[in-house]
Image (spheres, rainbow, N blue to C red):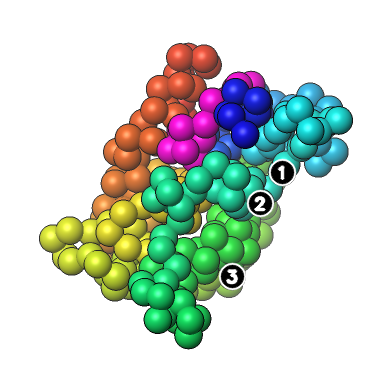
Amino acid sequence: MASSDIKVTLYWLEQSRAHSILWILEALSIPYALKTFRRGKDMLAPPELKAVHPLGKSPIITIERPEYAQPLVLAESAAIVEYLLNHFGGEEKGLVPKKFASEEDAAKNLETEEWLRYRFYMHYVEGSLMPQMVMALVVDSVRNAPIPFFLKPIPRLVADKIQTSYLDKQFAVHFPFLESQLKSAPGTTEAHRGGLCGPKFNAADILMSFPMIAATGRGVITQETYPEIVAYAERLKKDDGYQRAVKKIEEMDGKFVASL
């Protein structure tokens, strides 16, 4: 079907994972409409998004096709990305690594390391890493809650306890793992690093971009502690697709801020 017969609309919320979906749309060269939303004073998504999807979260995309009586509404980052990759040539555009190196390997179901890493990170980012990043935001909000000064020590004590007893321990597992994965990515060298799966970015790297850029931007990760991750985040921000997505938001919304 011609792309002109399909209308894709992205409902983009500032400082959210919706920017990864915008990057995917740019990388796949999919024509799309873009609707932007700002967070409320409570830093949550505005209620208008519930008119699009009952969860009222972002990212959301809608797909309109002549065969559909109603637009298809998709939520959840990985589900959206997998749909777009499957329907708009993700493998042909290089966003899905080659699964088998040869016909012989295909007959034996011997997948490439790059493809296996890609599958892992498509699930790892939302299933393992993002819950820790979200909790870190919640802990920070508790620590800096706008309450009378004489009460401030109480939430700070609670937040610090969660930080030291849980979050710091989780990050001490995840970040060294990612640091080592970047060093050992197939097809890369110390002088020529790429993504987590191989020498070129794929869709899994694009999904990983939000937590990695957020972690480096908030100082959770520093050059001294995890230099490979910091360099990876910088490479992600310099990618042409990421920059086109940033420019699109700046043109529509006036400014772009990567994360909370």
Instruction: Find numbered disc 3 in the image and state the secondary structure of the residue it sits on.
Output: helix
Q: Could you tell me if residue 235 is visible in this image?
A: yes
Residue at 16% from the left image edge and 65% from the top image edge: 190
Q: Is residue 60 left or right of residue 165?
A: right
Q: Are marks 2 and 3 in contact (CB under 8 Å)?
A: no
Residue 63 pos. (x, y %): 70, 33
Magenta span includes 37: no
- Which residue is under mark 2? 79
Magenta span includes 29: yes
Q: Give the foreground label among 3 and 1.
A: 1
Residue 221 pos. (x, y %): 37, 56
Q: How many marks?
A: 3
Q: Is residue 23 left or right of residue 150?
A: left
- Which residue is under mark 1? 75
| Label located before the other in sequence (3 or 1) | 1
Q: CA–CA distance between discs 3 and 1?
A: 29 Å
- Which residue is under mark 3? 166
Q: Specify few, some or many for label 2: CA neighbours under 10 Å numbering under 14, 14-19, or 20 or more.
A: few
Extreme residue in the left direction: 191
Q: Could you tell me if residue 178 is visible in this image?
A: no
- On the image, which quarter does residue 196 sit in? bottom left
Q: CA–CA distance between discs 1 and 2?
A: 7 Å
Q: CA–CA distance between discs 2 and 3?
A: 29 Å
Q: Are marks 1 and 2 in contact (CB under 8 Å)?
A: yes
Q: Amino acid at mark 3?
A: Tyr
Residue 180 pos. (x, y %): 33, 72
Q: Amino acid at mark 1?
A: Ala
Residue at 39% from the left image edge and 68% from the top image edge: 114
Q: Give the foreground label among 2 and 3.
A: 2
